[in-house]
Image (cartoon, helix red, strand yellow):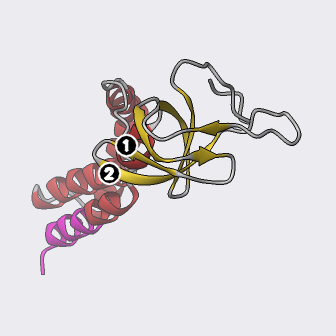
Amino acid sequence: MDGWMWWIGGALVLAVVEMLSLDLVFIMLAGGAVAGGITAAAGGPFWLQVIVACVVAVLLIVTLRPWLLQNLRRRTDLVETNAAAQVGRTAVVIAEVTELGGRVKLAGEVWSARLVDDGLPNSTGRVPEGVEVRVVKIDGATAVVAPAGATSQNADGAV
């Protein structure tokens, strides 16, 4: 088999590794391997193929990779999904909510809920059925809520 085919095969393997790592290093090395393959196809000796592959790979890593990373990081704001998207939403109490438990209807679904810890010992905070509450955080499958009119702070310091 011709030498250029080995270089292209190596480039393909490096491209697959890049798909697994998503680091933009292996794809730059693959670019160097393609350059080595072009040198081999042009009839260059093996030592020249290796030098061309190394120089091109280093140039790609030093010049192209930082620019690509900068542009990849300059994306639109992160849109929360799943449970994290529920924080800040309002819900309606369907079974009285205390610091120990309760049920709320949140985004059309029934969630187990509990009141946010207000920091008072022996607190008997209760939110009756039908009252609107705001989700402060999601703890596992439980919505930690506070009365919608109150601005309560949870243990993490979030409002």
Residue 127: image quadrant is: top right
Binning the other alpha carbons within 10 Å of mark 2 as few (below 14), some (14 to 19) or many (20 upward) gives few
Residue annotated with mark 1: 106
- Disc 1 is placed on an element classified as strand
User: Residue drawn at (17%, 61%), measured in percent from left and top?
Assistant: 40
Which residue of the protein is positioned furthest toward the bottom in this rendering?
Answer: 1
The residue lying toward the viewer, choosing from 158 and 16, is 158
* Horizontal and vertical percent position of residue 57: 36, 46
Left or right of 44? Residue 49 is right
Occupied quadrant, residue 106: top left
Q: Is residue 81 left or right of residue 97?
A: left
| 113 shown above or below 66 | below
Magenta-colored span = 1-13
Residue 82: in magenta span = no
Callout 1, which amino acid? Leu
Please name the predominant secondary structure of the magenta segment in the image. helix
Of the 4 image quadrants, the one containing the C terminus is top right
Q: Nearer the viewer, residue 102 or 79?
A: 102
**Residues under labels 2 and 1: Cα distance?**
5 Å
* Residue at 47% over, 35% down: 87
The residue under label 2 is 109
